[in-house]
Image (cartoon, helix red, strand yellow):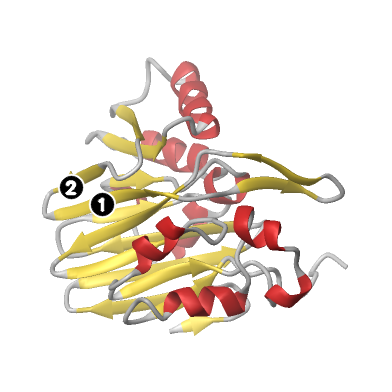
Amino acid sequence: MSDAETGSHSWQSGDVRVDIPFSRAGVAQHIIVRNRKVSLLFDAADGVLRDLLMRGLTPLKIDAIFFTHGHYDHMAGLHALLGFARMTERTQPLPIFAPVGCAEVLAAVEMFSRCYHDSTPFEIKVTELSPYQEVKRNDVSVTAYPMVHCGSIAGAGVLDPIAACGYRVECDGKTVAISGDTGLCDSLRELVSGADLAIIEATFAESSDLEPHILEKVHLSEDIAREVGKLAREYVLVHKAKVRKAWD
């Protein structure tokens, strides 16, 4: 099930379910991968709390949060999730994972902990993941793959590279690959290859309109993302540019 306007998508194979409540480049993206035992959240942008609750996905049941990188459209909702968990008296620890050097996520957790250090009933533990480092949550394995992603600001061109990774999730015999934001690189192909479902960013419409360094360092185009997606059994393109300017 997909919604082109919000970028939402759902996929299920056996007991493994993937929900993408919202995905729009420059606005927000969050992805849930779960089975009967574990619910993992990948990225937590603005609106994530609302989007989870509206779909009956209780934030209190999130077992861990993984961030692909620290840009606002992937992590701006973290404070809201932590605040909701505090207000509703979550007691189990909340592990948070991010690529090594992901300053935005580290700073957000530090600020929340500083504000509510004496009234948060659960432990927040942040782990910085190195390339190809594996994490296990019960019977689910998550491996971080290094991605190439530079920042960009309108009128300022391509900025410096930032800490970024994709994730390969092994769950109940199924593999889900999540690219995060990335340029075209060998590790992206490695991440996606053979996956049952690949979730691939496709910010730009066509590669023919872009300079090569944009596609190699910043974001993918839809045509290139489709070619990468063919390395998996199924794929879905996310993080597309807005369909229309609602604020115009």
Q: Which of marks 2 and 1 is nearer the N terminus?
A: 2
Q: Residue 180 carries which label?
A: none
Q: Position of residue 46 (x, y in %)?
A: 58, 50
Quadrant for residue 67, please give it. top left
- Which quadrant, please, contains the N terminus? bottom left
Q: Which residue, given by chain and number where applicable, does mark 1 sit on?
A: 142
Camera-near label (2 vs 1) is: 1
Spot occupied by residue 141 in the image (x, y as percentages of width and height): 19, 53
Residue 137: mark in rendering: 2
The reply to whether dot 2 and dot 1 touch (C-beta < 8 Å) is yes
CA separation in Å, label 2 and label 1: 8 Å
* In this view, 232 is above or below 102: below
Dot 1 alpha-carbon crowd within 10 angstroms: few under 14, some 14 to 19, many 20 or more: many
Residue at 34% of width from left, 77% of height from top? 232
Q: Is residue 56 visible?
A: no
* Residue depicted at x 67% and y 45%: 151
Quadrant the C terminus occupies: bottom right
Amino acid at pointer 1: Val
Q: Which amino acid does label 2 sit on?
A: Arg
Say which of 216 and 22 sits in front. 216
Q: In the image, residue 165 lies at what x, y percent?
A: 44, 48
Tag count: 2
Residue 238, image x and y in percent?
53, 70
Up/down of 136 relative to 12, above or below: above
The image quadrant that residue 210 belongs to is bottom right
Q: Residue at x 30, y 45 (%)?
A: 132
Q: Nearer the viewer, residue 145 or 8?
A: 145
Tag 2: Cα neighbours inside 10 Å, few (<14), some, or many (≥20)? some
Element under label 2? strand
- Residue 92: tell me if it is visible: yes
Q: Which residue shows up at 57% across the image and 75% down it?
A: 224
